Amino acid sequence: MSRDSAAAPGVRIRGLTVVYKTPAGELPAVSGVDLTLAPGTITGVVGESGSGKSTLALSLLNAVQPPGRISAGSVEIDGLGDVLALGGEELRRARGRKVGYVFQAAQNSLNPLKTIGKQLLDLGRSHDVDDLRELVRDAKGLLARMGLDGARVLDSHQHELSGGMRQRVGIMLALVLNAQVVVLDEPTTALDMITQATILRIIREVHEERALTTLVITHDVGAVAEVADSLAVMYGGRVVEHGPIAEVLGGPRHPYTQGLIRAIPRLSGDISLARALPGRPPTLGTLPVAGCVFRERCDRRMEICDTVEPEPVTHDGRTVSCHATGRPSPAVKRREYA
Ligand SMILES: Nc1ncnc2c1ncn2[C@@H]1O[C@H](COP(=O)(O)OP(=O)(O)OP(=O)(O)O)[C@@H](O)[C@H]1O
């Protein structure tokens, strides 16, 4: 099913802040995030555990649950408007039909009492799909591409499938309603390395065939390097760096991105140079309230980092929030950013 790639919608996340209620009050898991997903591209989001990736993914569907709450911002999707302004039936219809998704716990979110096929039909009916036969055909086709016997999987209950099979069922369900924005949160964690690479390749193929705009959340920078067009790096609820993937990985500018890449031998190129990032990522309770959230682990810390939060600065298509990387002054611009 090939479509005009010009039809892919753009997504603009602006000033997104999500807080969770804790004994210490409401604390931000995502803080003032601006991120644009260009139409027809795959954006990878990486960052250590707790950096806010899943919370960001949930926000794209306005699906943050208590004790969480989206406290500020907007998520504009072309053809849909601000998802955060949608509610009730409008929101239900947008989920799945306009924005397809696989959440992190997707492999456990299937109904244990119904076959996958029955759940597929329920999904189709709840979204007023006219041609359910076509829906089943498409589902079988997607499953076959991911190396599964579609008819057999549709006849199965969740407990008859392995974790990796369920994960592929989740991906099929995210794609089968032909949503044009697809959010995949850790889509391949239950898969071995080879299957993981195959599934990511298929995600890329389907993304291109169906003119999608896709967000892939992962903690595996190496895996996302194979499929994404651009990369957003999250730390402490902020997007600290965002840009074209080859450039971010080939010339990381934020000290955190540099540390992340140094820690991965297959990206740093030399196993003897691979070094784990020192220290631990912050939790909601340990996030500093002022200054740069990364300063405690940063090898380029300056005085200003203790008090002033760095603003995102965009230069040459790359956005970086760091005082040390800095805003280039006109005189040194060429040299610093060559
Ligand atoms: N239901 C919740 N209640 C309280 N705090 C939460 C809740 N869900 C997430 N958090 C906190 O919000 C922060 C961001 O969590 P989130 O799951 O978005 O991060 P993540 O980058 O997706 O991590 P992981 O890779 O481990 O899934 C973390 O500090 C986490 O502990």
Image (cartoon, rainbow, N blue to C red):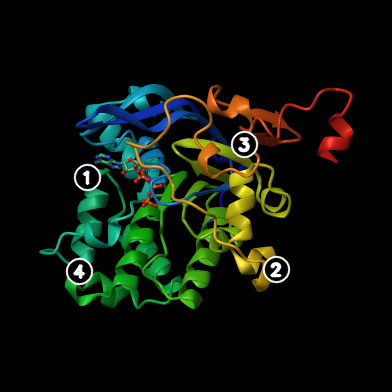
Label 4 beta carbon less than 8 Å to ligand 1:
no
> Which one is earlier in the sequence, the residue at label 4 or at label 2?
4
Q: Quadrant of residue 126?
A: top left
Q: Residues within 10 Å of mark 4 (few under 14, many from 20)?
A: many
Q: Which residue is mark 2?
A: 269
- For residue 166, the mark is none
Would you say residue 311 is visible in this rendering?
no
Q: Residues within 10 Å of mark 1 (few under 14, many from 20)?
A: few
Which residue occupies 49% across, 41% down?
A: 235
Up/down of 70 relative to 140, above or below: above
Q: Which residue is mark 1?
A: 126
- For residue 301, the mark is 3
Q: Which residue is mark 4?
A: 158
> Which one is earlier in the sequence, the residue at label 1 or at label 4?
1
Q: Look at label 4 and name its amino acid.
A: Gln
Closer to the camera: disc 4 or disc 2?
2
Closer to the camera: disc 1 or disc 2?
2
C-alpha separation, residue under disc 2 versus residue under disc 3: 26 Å
Q: Disc 2 on helix, strand or loop?
A: loop
Q: Disc 3 on helix, strand or loop?
A: loop
C-alpha separation, residue under disc 4 versus residue under disc 2: 41 Å
Q: Look at label 2 and name its amino acid.
A: Gly
> Which one is earlier in the sequence, the residue at label 1 or at label 3?
1
